[in-house]
Image (tube, rainbow, N blue to C red):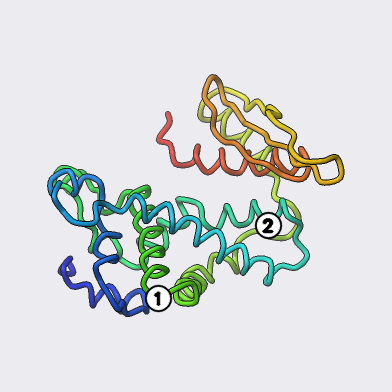
Amino acid sequence: MTDPNDLGALERVLGYAFADRATLEVALRHTSWLNEHPGASGGDNERLEFLGDAVLDLVVGHRLMTRFPELREGELSVTRAQVVSEAGLAEIASALGLGQWLRLGKGEDKSGGRTKRSILADAFEAVVAAVYLDGGYPAAAEMVERLLAPRIETVEHTGFYDFKTRLQEMALARLKLSPVYKVVAELGPDHAKRFVVEVWIGDELYARADGTSKKSADQQAAAAAAFKLEGLNVG
């Protein structure tokens, strides 16, 4: 196993050398580690996850618009959701061996935290944010495009992927329930209206999304709900 303190090795894996490794250090800290080191400067990586998620959406969204000029807004949103899903980001993090460098609490480490999909995906988002803060948008965009290129190239993009059907099948198979879609808001003037849709399965809200049509919003909400349901260990 790689020495978790050897951040130079991680830089080589990422293809980016930090001017200041302090932000990278924070990006690798899981909440469980901070609970055991409450005085650590910079805290854990949760705030960086938030920023990294936004950077990923921007970089991947721009790349998809360029790569697939024929796709409409709703199709682009769903395609992006596939690329930056928790499962997709965890797959990339695993391929990089990112788990070797994570700072985990002893209990989380013993329970297999270094291979947990949610922890790996969150850490990857945090690392993206660290590169953005250290080297700016060009550096972050170059790394994201390079590491996510295979997923962008292979993701389903011909036509509109029917996530409503996919979610219906998954929900029935796993939960014995059918999804329910609710339009909870209509925003903007008639010529530029946006629809906000929630998808419920049973008494749980699984996702909310908006789009320029109810169909588009339904599909985006269904996609988000499907990714969430895929991450559950149900039945």
Crowding at label 1, few (<14), some or many (≥20) Cα neighbours within 10 Å? some
Quadrant in which the C terminus is drawn: top left
Q: Residue furthest right?
A: 191
The location of residue 174, given as percent across then percent down, is 51, 30
The location of residue 72, given as percent across then percent down, is 76, 57
Q: Earlier in the sequence, mark 2 or mark 1?
A: 2
- Helix, strand or loop at label 2? It is helix
Identity of the residue drawn at 62% across and 31% down: 199
Residue 40 as seen in the image, left or right of residue 124: left
Q: Is 6 situated above or below 205?
A: below
Q: In the figure, residue 180 lies in which quadrant?
A: top right
Q: Residue furthest top?
A: 203
The location of residue 48, given as percent across then percent down, is 37, 56
Identity of the residue drawn at 41% across and 65% down: 128
The residue wearing badge 1 is 135
Q: Is 172 situated above or below 155?
A: above
Crowding at label 2, few (<14), some or many (≥20) Cα neighbours within 10 Å? many
Q: Is 98 situated above or below 220?
A: below
Residue 119 as seen in the image, left or right of residue 173: left
- Tell whether label 1 touches label 2 (CB within 8 Å): no
Q: In the figure, residue 75 lies in which quadrant?
A: bottom right
Three-letter residue code for mark 2? Leu
The location of residue 200, given as percent across then percent down, is 59, 27
- Helix, strand or loop at label 1? It is helix
The residue wearing badge 2 is 76
Quadrant in which the N terminus is drawn: bottom left
Residue 180 as seen in the image, left or right of residue 232: right
For discs 2 and 1, the disc positioned in front in the rendered view: 1
Three-letter residue code for mark 1? Gly
How much space separates mark 2 and mark 1, taking CA atoms? 27 Å
Residue nearest the viewer, comparing 177 with 93: 93
